[in-house]
Image (cartoon, rainbow, N blue to C red):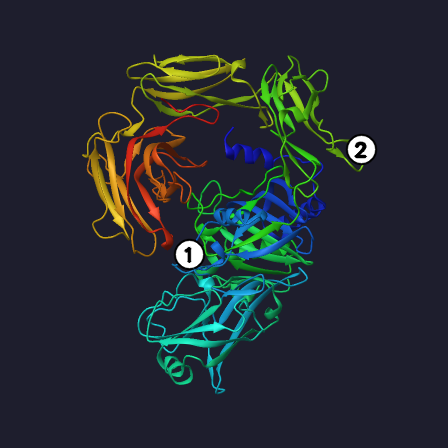
Amino acid sequence: MGKRRRLAAALTSVFAALWLPLAADFGRNQARAEETGGFAISGTASFQAAPGVSHTSFTMTGEGLKQSAHLMEIDPKNPHIRLIAYSSRGEVSEQETVGRMIGELESLGMHAAAGFNGDFFSAVGVPSGLQITDGEIVTSPTTIKTMLLVMPDGSVRLQDSVRMTATLTADDGETLSINMINRTRVASHTNYAFVYTPRFGDSTRTPEGGVEAVIALSDPHHKLTAGQTLTGTIESVSETADTPISDGKLVLSASGTKADWVREHTAPGRKVKLDISFDKGVNEARQVISGNSTLGFVLLKDGQIPADLLDASDPNNTELHPRTILATKQGKLYVFAVDGRQPGFSDGLSLPAAARYLQSLGMEQAINIDGGGSTTYYARIPGDAVPSLLNRPSDGHERPVGNALVVLATTKPKHRDGLALTPSGPLRILSGSSVRFDAKGWDRYYNAVPVSPGDLIWTADPGIGTIDRTGLFTAGANPAAGRITAADDTPGNADRANKSRVSQSVDIAVTDRIARLTLLPDNFVVEAGGTIALRAKAYDEAGHEVLLSPDRLDWSVEGGIGTVSGQGVLRAVYGEASGKVAARYGTVSAEASVVAGKSPLIEPFESAGRIRSSEARTVPGSVTLSLASDPVRFGDHSAKLTYDFTGTSGTSGAYINFLDDGGKTGREIGGKPARFGVWLYGDANNHILRLGVTDGTGKNRIWNMTASGGINWTGWRYVYANVPEGTVFPLKVRNVVVEEASSSNKNAGVLYFDQFRAEYAVEGGSPAN
């Protein structure tokens, strides 16, 4: 079972012991939303990610649109969690995905229960607004439109229209007004003064044309804190740029008339003091994350929608996009995430529509933070050690962002107090079919506690079938209803409240009838002599899925395409043919169209006739593409791609473009492939490999073939990109690209590629060989 199916199974679980007090209240709010918010809610599924942290996913329909949405309720005063505003490596030197930032926190010994994208950000990754982490100012402009404050007692507030006042005072009493803290100074910043700390990175990254003074702090451990004076001694004053930033020191960078002030009032050995303050009570906040751009709107103010949000002449109010929104109600924080730009799955919300929906839920305050391709929603599924990405970002992959809001779990795993079974119930299973159940465990704080097969005793109610000690259930021959149960047989893992075993059950209905049958894939290409496992899905008259084993069906082929086994595995003929695979149960049947013998091999890299290289933000001319005779994985040649990203800024890319018969970029692929794969000889330079495609709507998509920094090996390895659910076919493959966004990892290297192919396998099957 694929990861997306495992997530879906977990999300639809009843989790009887975990259903939250929120659920009833949320249900009442849903009904009210249909009346006042204009949305019908369906497909609701909930679970608890940590104490005081509850997740709900659902589908919203209204205004002729469909939305895939997630809502997290967070009790910020719960003693077993804490909120943190986090940027990659604790700096604002580059973008990173929320998933990688969660991984960084895990590597530091912290454990995340949830995580979301944060503020809007600049091209170099600096968040646009104020960020305070554990009381330390990480970055700030002079004015901030909207923000979330986490106060010392754990309470949260949403605030807007905040102003920073920052001054540097020389020992002669003269003061200099500071414009920015840890922001990117560019040549157009005339008459500006910036203060830099190590949170900005290794250096100021400033252009020529200014004065920079290094200040050694009197207390080198003193952090930049609002409302507290920092004192120090001028160490150097230079007409320079890109000054290194060291621990225990600040750098003052000024231009124009403010540079003149630095020249007049500072010199090595002179004392200075720095004061930074924010209005509206922000000085006391321990964590701050902002929504600071043209789209950093207040959506609700004391339960009311601001009038300017209802101005239909402003396209910012009418456009549909993915959204990430923060809201508060009765002291709790809510994170509302809606996917978008994916017709048929999720269209995206306008800001007024989002405000109306949140208003219908009784939210008191709400602000819009970064959305679009940045919208990212992670939550820890019960029994999992780390959070999973639950939304579907519109780029087809996680976008690196400036910072993140993360919910940390503050307790360590203890004894098992609960179990989660997948697939979850209630289930309908066709008589005689087999279904394997898996179990995950968690403690009373929803931390993962591993489960081994020998830890559990599996039982099935009489009449519904049998289940073995590994969790393999085989349904009986006749219709029946009951449940299967997994009980913890490990000493010390009893429910200490009632001294009974920890257990979990799944309700099962065994049926011998189905009303509809489908096959996946239903239209595919398989190479000569290749194999592919088809997957059958069945439904009852009410449209509910009925699980079944492939051996319960009668399989057949037509058109001379090959043979099909009783398990639904097609082996294609050696040659070319077209036809169908059919599956039948009683009077119900389904078919899949098949083309055999047309190789799914997209590019063997045996000639250079239909491939070309290109480059973006690289050392000019460094990207070359040629055929190599060593190393080779298949045939006589591989494709050799050289690149040099050294010293470049922004996201660097080295491309292999796939040309059609007319020499244009974009090669059309037949059928409905499940994924694309290529053999890659890595150079251990820790870049990312991505695939560019054009879908059936004509929109360009980019899918990851490795994780960020994932090319971390030397030698041959097969890498692939899964085709997301809901993709519109047919597809054209445009290119594969080696990318690097991090300025700290700009280097040169060589990669080799062999046998780029489309795979038409389905979950549980094998790719064509």
Q: Is residue 272 above or below residue 728?
A: below
Q: Which residue is mark 1?
A: 94
Q: Quadrant of the C terminus?
A: top left
Identity, as a three-letter code, of the amino acid under mark 2: Lys
Q: Is residue 124 visible?
A: yes
Image x and y of residue 291, in percent: 51, 61
Rounded to the nearest angstrom, the CA distance separating label 2 from label 1 is: 52 Å
**Residue at the spot 81% in from the left edge and 35% down from the top edge:** 498
Q: Quadrant of residue 153?
A: bottom right
Q: Quadrant of residue 486?
A: top right
Identity, as a three-letter code, of the amino acid under mark 1: Glu
**Residue at the spot 29% in from the left edge and 23% down from the top edge:** 599
Q: Is residue 544 above or below residue 71?
A: above
Tally the marks. 2
Dot 1 alpha-carbon crowd within 10 angstroms: few under 14, some 14 to 19, many 20 or more: many
Q: Is residue 61 visible?
A: no
Q: Which residue is mark 2?
A: 499
Dot 2 alpha-carbon crowd within 10 angstroms: few under 14, some 14 to 19, many 20 or more: few
Q: Name the foreground residue: 288 vs 534.
A: 288
Query: Is 365 placed left or right of 697 in the picture?
Result: right
Image x and y of residue 67, in percent: 52, 45
Q: Name the foreground residue: 763 vs 552.
A: 763
Image x and y of residue 163, in percent: 53, 73
Image x and y of residue 353, in percent: 54, 54
Q: Secondary structure at mark 1?
A: loop
Q: Quadrant of residue 16?
A: top right
Query: Is 524 placed left or right of 461 in the picture?
Result: left
Residues at badges 2 and 1 in contact (C-beta under 8 Å)? no
